[in-house]
């Protein structure tokens, strides 16, 4: 007579062992990531865990194990509103799931206090490692992390003066390429719309914009540089104000994806979608379906997430090599808005 299958979510370790055709000690070794278990057996155990929806008691397991591991990671992203952060979140979760590790995730909305509180909460949960994005140049909690010996990998933004593993986009080079693309299409009066310059990413992209102007011998016009923008609404208002100038910009480099959405609204409202060129930093959902399509400097958040997960698990598995800073290249995707030529009027180009 076969043993009845327990209700999902109420299975015991014995039930998992019976379904996997393994001993209880083997199941325990698999769940606690201990050695001397074949990959085939580990797969059978994890398949049984998922089929029975077995609820692993991570805290109890950590108390029994000599290394005190909880088989959890802490992940902090900028904002769940931003698709870039969402892709990193999903990628890290997928990588962790393959190793039977749970991910506690939080977002900070680029607020330093919220960031600090989130990290403190993750540490209280005794996570094995942290993958973090920061809103400040010098996070005050770094000393606490070091004291506790918790491995940490930063994504997207790296703290200043910290010798830590970091995975980020090539922000400065990407912004320079985007601005140079507009210059190559004849533009000389190019506006910049950017986030808060105390964010390292915004600072790097601002620098890339200036690099491109300097390389082309174009003077900087401070009146068409607007920073400290944080969302689509702010981006729309900023560009609307620039379009109302006596000498408006003929092109726009938007240094953040949510700001780019605002810029698109402003151009549409002014009926200038086909007249003023636009390049945005970071890709947008449906950017290839609007008319004209949105030219972007695309990041690769999936690659960033993969590299961050690989790095944190390498640290957890005993890699004590020097910290590394990995910069993931960006890609220019021309779709239409960045290829609009400046309008020619009597007396020159507008």
Image: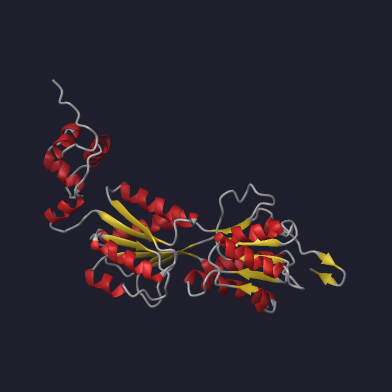
Total count of labels:
0
Point out residue 171 in the picture as x, y percentages from the top left corner.
52, 67
User: Split into 4 quadrants, where in the image is the C terminus?
Assistant: bottom right
Q: Which of 99 and 41 is in front in this view?
A: 99
> Is residue 158 positioned above or below 292 on the image?
below
Query: Could you tell me residue 161's position as x and y percent?
Result: 38, 78
**Residue occupying the point 41% across, 56% down:** 305
Colour scheme in use = secondary structure
Q: Can residue 165 be seen in this view?
A: no
Between 95 and 12, the one lying in front of the other is: 12
Q: Nearer the viewer, residue 86 or 175?
A: 86
Give the answer, above or below, for where 39 lies relative to 238.
above
| Residue 246 at least partly seen | yes
Q: Is residue 124 left or right of residue 324?
A: left
Q: In this view, does 226 lie to the left or right of 317?
A: right
Q: In which quarter of the image is residue 157?
A: bottom left
Q: Which residue is drawn at 70% across and 77% down?
A: 218
* Residue drawn 21% across the image and 55% down it: 70
Farthest top residue? 1
Task: Indicate the quadrant where residue 126 lies.
Answer: bottom left
In the rendered image, the quadrant that contains the N terminus is top left
* Image coords of residue 36 (percent x, y): 16, 46
């Amino acid at each position: 007579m076969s043993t009845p299958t327990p209700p999902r979510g109420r299975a015991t370790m014995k039930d998992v062992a019976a379904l996997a055709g393994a001993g209880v000690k083997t199941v325990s070794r698999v769940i606690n990531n201990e050695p001397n278990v074949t990959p085939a057996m580990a797969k059978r155990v994890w398949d049984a865990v998922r089929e029975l929806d077995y609820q692993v008691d991570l805290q109890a397991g950590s108390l029994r194990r000599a290394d005190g591991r909880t088989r959890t990671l802490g992940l902090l992203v900028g904002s769940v509103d931003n698709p870039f952060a969402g892709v990193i979140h999903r990628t890290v979760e997928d990588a962790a799931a393959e190793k039977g590790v749970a991910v506690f995730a939080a977002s900070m909305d680029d607020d330093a206090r919220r960031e600090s509180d989130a990290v403190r909460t993750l540490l209280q949960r005794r996570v094995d490692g942290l993958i973090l994005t920061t809103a400040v140049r010098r996070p005050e909690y770094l000393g606490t992390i070091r004291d506790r010996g918790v491995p940490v990998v930063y994504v997207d933004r790296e703290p200043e003066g910290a010798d830590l593993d970091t995975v980020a986009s090539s922000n400065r080079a990407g912004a320079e390429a985007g601005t140079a693309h507009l210059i190559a299409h004849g533009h000389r009066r190019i506006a910049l719309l950017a986030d808060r310059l105390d964010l390292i990413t915004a600072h790097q992209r601002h620098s890339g914009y200036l690099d491109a102007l300097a390389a082309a011998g174009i003077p900087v016009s401070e009146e068409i540089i607007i920073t400290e923008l944080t969302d689509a609404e702010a981006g729309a208002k900023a560009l609307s104000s620039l379009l109302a100038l006596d000498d408006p910009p003929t092109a726009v480099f938007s240094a953040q994806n949510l700001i780019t959405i605002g810029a698109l609204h402003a151009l549409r409202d002014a009926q200038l979608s086909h007249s003023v060129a636009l390049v945005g930093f970071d890709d947008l959902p449906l950017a290839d379906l609007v008319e004209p399509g949105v030219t972007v400097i695309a990041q690769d958040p999936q690659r960033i997430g993969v590299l961050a997960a690989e790095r944190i698990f390498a640290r957890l598995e005993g890699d004590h090599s020097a910290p590394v800073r990995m910069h993931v290249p960006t890609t220019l995707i021309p779709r239409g808005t960045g290829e609009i030529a400046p309008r020619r009027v009597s007396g020159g180009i507008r």
